[in-house]
Image (cartoon, helix red, strand yellow):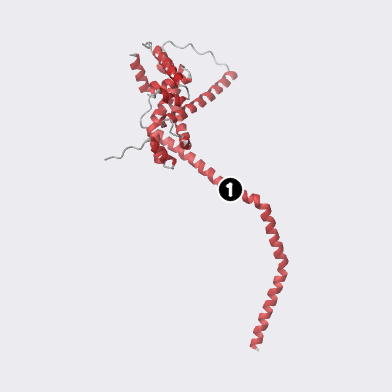
Amino acid sequence: MSDDRLAEFWRATEAPGADLAFALALEERIARRRLQFDLAAAVAAALALIAPLAILWPTLSARADALVTSLDAAGPALAAVAVMGGALLWLSQREAEV
Amino acid sequence: MTTPAPTDAELVAAARSGSHAAFREIVARHQQAVRSFLRRVTGDPDAADDLAQETFLVAWTGLWRYRGQASLRSWLCAIAWKKQLSVARSRQRESRRAEAAEPTPAAPLPDHRLDLAAALASLPDAQRAAVALCLGGEFTHSEAAQVLGLPLGTIKSHVERGRAKLLAALGGHDE
C-alpha cells in the first residue's frame, strides 16, 4: 500500500517525456550564449590585430618619421634633377626642330 | 527498414563536431531524467526547470569534458547536482544574512502527517538526491554514486534510510 503511494508520488513528480516549451527556452539560452561567444571571439580577434600594432607603434612611428625626413632632404635634389631633365628634353627637341 | 537511433556516444561525437541537431537530440533524450531528478531534489518544478536549463547549457559548452566513463544521463545529472548544491549553498547564505538582519518567528512544529513531498524535503541533501535517483529515477546504486560523487556503500545506506523515512511519513513500515 505504502509502496503504491510512493510509486504514485514518483509518477506525480516525473517531468514530461517531451516538452516543447522547455526545449524552446533552452534553444533561446543557447543562442544567447552562442552570441556572447561570437562577440567575445570578435573582440579577441580585434585585440589580436590591434595589440601587435600598439606594441610595434613606437618603432613603426620612428621608421615613418625617418622616411619622411629622408624624403624631405632629397626633395630639392629630386626637384633639381626633374627641372634639369625637363630642360634637357626641351633643348633636345628644339635642336631637332632647328 | 529504419535506421537505428544513434547511441549517446554517437550523438556526443556529432554534437562535439558542431551538430546542433545532435545536441537537441541529447536534450530530448535526457531532459526528463534531469528535470525529474531536480524536481524531486528541489521540490520546486520551476526552479528545477531553470536548473535543468543551466545544466544543459553547461553540457553544451563543456561536452568536450565528457569522457564516456559514466553514462551520459549520469554525467548530466552530476552537473545538475553540482548546480543544485551551489544554488542551495547561496540560498543558505542569503537566509542566514536575512535572519541576522531580521529575526523571524520560530517555525511551527512539523506536522505528523507530512506528505511525501515534505518528507522528501526534510531529508538531508545527499540522502534526498540518492532517494530521488534510485527510487524515483531508476538509477542503479553505482550510477547514483557516480552522479553524487559518493561511495557506493553511502548511497546504499542513504537510499535505505531515506526510503524508511518516506514510508514512515506515509504511516507505513519498511517490512
The disc labelled 1 sits on which kind of residue? Ala
Residue A3 showing in the rendered view = yes
Q: Quadrant of residue A88?
A: bottom right
Q: Residue at x 66, y 86 (%)?
A: A95
State the SS at label 1.
helix
Label 1 resides on the chain identified as A
Residue sitting nearer the eye, B83 or B67: B67
Q: Residue at x 73, y 66 (%)?
A: A73
State whether residue A61 is above or below residue B82: below
Q: Position of residue A2 (x, y in %)?
A: 35, 14
Split into 4 quadrants, where in the image is the C terminus of chain A? bottom right
Q: Position of residue B113 (x, y in %)?
A: 41, 11
Q: Residue at x 53, y 44 (%)?
A: A41
State whether residue A67 is above or below residue A29: below
Please state if B41 lies on the left or on the right of A86 as rendered. left
State whether residue A9 is above or below residue B11: above
Count all numbered tags in the image, as a single digit: 1
Please state if A53 lies on the left or on the right of B39 as rendered. right
Single out the residue that lies furthest toward the bottom.
Answer: A98
Please state if B155 lies on the left or on the right of A66 as rendered. left
Q: Position of residue B120 (x, y in %)?
A: 43, 18
Q: Position of residue B65 (x, y in %)?
A: 48, 35
Residue B43 showing in the rendered view = no
Residue sitting nearer the eye, B143 or A41: B143
Q: Residues within 10 Å of mark 1 (few under 14, many from 20)?
A: few
State whether residue B11 is above or below residue A53: above
Q: Residue at x 60, y 49 (%)?
A: A50
Q: Quadrant of residue B38?
A: top left
Split into 4 quadrants, where in the image is the N terminus of chain A? top left
Residue sitting nearer the eye, B97 or A44: A44
Residue annotated with mark 1? A48
